[in-house]
Image (cartoon, helix red, strand yellow):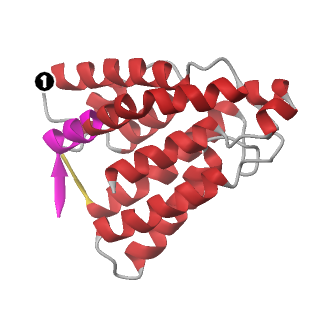
Amino acid sequence: MSYGINDAKALIARVSDIIEAHKDELNELDGRSGDGDLGMSVALGLAATKASAEAFEGDDMGKMLAMAAMGTLVSSGIMAVGKAFKGKTEVEEADVVAIPRTFADAIAARGGAKLGDKTILDALYPMADVLEERVAAGDELGVAMGAAAAKAREAAEATSGIQASVGRAKWLGERAAANPDGGAILCAVVAEGLA
């Protein structure tokens, strides 16, 4: 199965809608470990990404994603996926399966974090592993995504009790350590919504 520009736009819209629906939950979680604006900030950024994608004319998915990305760590992931899709008017299932790892690698490179640092990567890399493994084992993409979403949630919840090694949560010390990482929970919420 292949996917075109309208599928990519629909995916961006779906992710934006998922975040909008969960922004209060994400704000509440972030308020326990930070300034309480995670849901609002990501919702606003993705709403802008959605609007940019909707306004894009043409069929080059890479160009559309590059133009839609904003200036955050998450945008690094969007831009990396855009670079991987540059010039493509359709992508195959293997391209879709590669998105989480491409996204995670870009965030890791830009932010300097790694697996175990109590960031979004702690949910995103395990999700990517399960998605790749399940598709390679013959699962349909939707079934594999369900398993990957469950792993993302499990991994995100497991960040509770861990001292952050990077970012704002590092500065907050024990206050942030008591709670799961907001970025990891964000990853789980999106994965569950897409599954």
Quadrant assignment, res 7: top left
Place of residue 61 in the rendered image (x, y in percent of width and height, measured from the top left): 25, 37
- Residue highlighted by disc 1: 57
Quadrant assignment, res 112: top right
Is 135 magenta? The answer is: no
Place of residue 35 in the rendered image (x, y in percent of width and height, measured from the top left): 66, 17
Bounds of the magenta span? 1-13
Place of residue 118 in the rendered image (x, y in percent of width and height, measured from the top left): 73, 43
Identity of the residue furthest to the bottom in this view = 137
Mark 1: give few (<14), some (14-19) or many (20+) Cα within 10 Å: few
Q: Amino acid at mark 1?
A: Glu
Quadrant (top left, top right, bottom left, bottom right) of the C terminus? bottom left
In the picture, measured across the screen, residue 120 lies left or right of residue 112, that is left
Place of residue 70 in the rendered image (x, y in percent of width and height, measured from the top left): 43, 19
Residue nearest the observer in this picture, 121 or 33: 33
Is 9 magenta? The answer is: yes
Quadrant (top left, top right, bottom left, bottom right) of the N terminus? bottom left
Tell me what residue is drawn at x 80 percent, y 47 percent. Answer: 161
Above or below, 150 relative to 116 = below
Tell me what residue is drawn at x 39 percent, y 44 percent. Answer: 84
Helix, strand or loop for the magenta stretch, by majority: helix
SS class, disc 1: loop
- Marker count (numbered): 1
Quadrant assignment, res 117: top right
Tell me what residue is drawn at x 82 percent, y 25 percent. Answer: 172
In the picture, measured across the screen, residue 50 lies left or right of residue 131, that is left
Tell me what residue is drawn at x 14 percent, y 35 percent. Answer: 59
